[in-house]
Every structure is written in structure tokens, then in C-alpha cells.
Image (tube, rainbow, N blue to C red):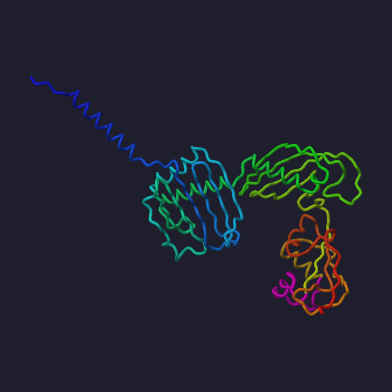
Amino acid sequence: MKKTKIPGIFAVLLITAAIVTACMQVAKPDNSNAVITYKFYGGFVMPAYAIQELVVTKDTATWIIRAADGNITGRFEKNLTKEQFNAIVKVFTDNNFASFLDRYDEGQNHVTDVGFTDITFAANGKTKTVTAYNVNDYMPAGLIRIREKLQETVEFTKTPDESQVKALAEAWIRGAPTYAWDGSGLQFVNYTQRESFPVRHVLTYTFTSSHAGYGDRSGKMFAQLVTDHSIKITILDDTVESAVIDEKWDEKGQFIIRSELSLAYRPKMCEKTPWQVWEENSGRVYIRAPTDEEIITHYYASVYNINVRDVKKVQLGGVACLACDVCLETYRFGLNVNASEMQPLLDEGWTRVDVIPPAPKVVPHP
């Protein structure tokens, strides 16, 4: 009876399997040096945010914001671990990014003013870019999953870690008026994150001043008294949103919280003030025409829900010139407002009385 050569068949099968496995391993692309970009442009955005781009390499994720003129207006960078980078690459391979069309804009009759997104994956000498509207509608499910992962990476990159936040906070405190004038011994106390979007970072520090009072006290009389302070600083989007010392002094705005401040406004000749434009478009009819003081009071109460008090129009005297588009009026307005509510007024051109220069003399042009 002839014997079957079973071992030989197994050997052939094992060799064949090994060859197939080796071929599969060779065929698998090496994406360890892939470069991924995720770019936004177009649509209705502020000129300072015209172009926004995420660049991912094996080591870093960088989020860059450019104005319409090409100047960089914002830049955020984070180191990536190998695991983080591989997870980003994996979403491209798992969803077969190379199989997608070069462009998805079939929703143009339904989606407007949102701008476009370019997603680019470059590796092994090959580059693939997919362009689509900056919304998830009208896109394949796999491309949506890729966009979601990239957006998650954007948020990670934009959010500073604790060490970055502390460095920003400490540099700001040291350069702020109170500490810069006579502060010393800055000490970190704690750090928390508020549950908000974007995330707000809240840090508390202590320090010592050699004199009483707050702010830059140059030219003022203050007792030479060692004073301990606590400052709570809030950071939003890499910017100091608020800074409060001893729960009473607004270090960013330089005022006692809940105090009342005096503001002044000097109009330009032939230019309408915000409250004049508002009044002209209000459609209201009066038996008696309102005074400037009444219009200002009603304007800030209606538009900003701010209670301004003691509104006055003060004549300054002087001679008016004919160049009305550049010259100031011969009068100005004054009012009092709670310090915590004054920012909208400052944004519209009001000035704190304690910091405005003396009124210049108005003389005729030659």
C-alpha cells in the first residue's frame, strides 16, 4: 500500500502561508511620516480668521490662523504621542481615504456662506486632497468620521495644558500694574477648569506688595506697608479674560469692583454718535423732542441694559473750524456708570475721566 506524504503537504502549505504573510506585510504602506492638513477658507468670517489650518506630523499638531492678507493672527502647537498620531492616521486608513472623490459640493444649492474644507493626506510620495463644504451634510459617512477626528485634534491643539496656562498667567501678572510697581514673591495656589466651551482656565496666585493700594501708584501718596494679596486670573483662548485681586480690584480694567466711574465723550463735528443713529431709526414720535441727555440714557438702557447716571452736556468753549470731518465739537458729554458695566461705552469711544488728557484748544485752520 502506497503511503500518503502528509508532512510534505503541510510543509508546502506552511511555506505558502509564510510567503502570503510576507507579501501582505510588504504591501502594507508605511504611514509613520505622514503629513495631514485640514484647512478652512471662504464663507462669512472675520478678515482676521480668513484661513485656518491644522497641520499634523508624527510629532506635533499645529493650528494656524491667517488673516485675509496672509499674516498669521494666531498659532497653537501641541506635541503628539506616538499613540495619538497613530490614532489620527488610523481613521484615514480605516475609512479608505484614498477611495473618496476629490470634491464634494453637490449641496451648493442648499448650503451657503459656510466656506470650504480641504483635507490632505500625504505619505509615501503620494498626496490625496478632498475638498468639501465646511459642513457634514452631503458627505460620505467615512469622510464625516475623518472630519470629526480632525476637529477633535483641532480642539486638543487649541486648548493649552496646565504648564502653558501657568506660564501665560504668571507672565501677565508680572507685567500688570500692581505687581510690576511693587510686587514680589509670586506663588501659585491652584488651577481649575470651568465646564464651558471654550474651556476657561482659572488660576489663583498670592504675592506681596510693599505699599498699600493697587495699580501703578507713581506720583500718589500711599503708606509703605507690606500687604499680602491674592489674585484670581481667568484665561480663555490663550487670552486673559479677567484678573481680580483680593476679590475687590479689577486688575485688567484698573478699578474697584462695583465702584462708579465717570466717563466722557467728545464727538467729532459732522459725525453722528451711536445714540443719535439709534434714535433716528427708532421710529418714535414725541410731543417734545428729547434732550441729548435723555437719548443717551434711553440708548444704553435699551441696547445694553446699562443704567447710566448724571448724564451731562458740557460746553467747552473755543472756536469751531471748517474741517468738520477731523475736528472735535466744542462740547463733550459726561456720565457715571458702574465700573463693571462700562466696557460697551469704552468700545464706543467713551473715555475714563481719570485718564483722559486735558481738552485741547480748538483753533481755526489757516
Q: Is residue 59 above or below residue 71?
A: above
Q: Nearer the viewer, residue 236 or 19?
A: 19
Does the magenta run of residues contain 145?
no
**Which residue lies at the image location 87% right of the left edge and 50% below the top edge?**
218
Q: Position of residue 18 (x, y in %)?
A: 28, 31
The C terminus, quarter of image: bottom right
Q: Position of residue 85 (x, y in %)?
A: 48, 41
* Quarter holding residue 179: top right
The N terminus, quarter of image: top left
Instruction: Please give the range of residues in magenta.
Output: 269-292
Q: Position of residue 277 (x, y in %)?
A: 71, 73
* Quarter holding residue 345: bottom right
* Quarter holding residue 348: bottom right
**Which residue lies at the image location 76% right of the left edge and 57% below the top edge?**
341
Q: Main secondary structure of the magenta part?
A: loop
Outermost residue on the top side: it is 1
**Which residue lies at the image location 59% right of the left edge and 48% below the top edge?**
76
Q: Is residue 62 left or right of residue 299?
A: left
Q: Position of residue 162 (x, y in %)?
A: 64, 40
Outermost residue on the left side: it is 1
Q: Is residue 133 left or right of residue 280?
A: left
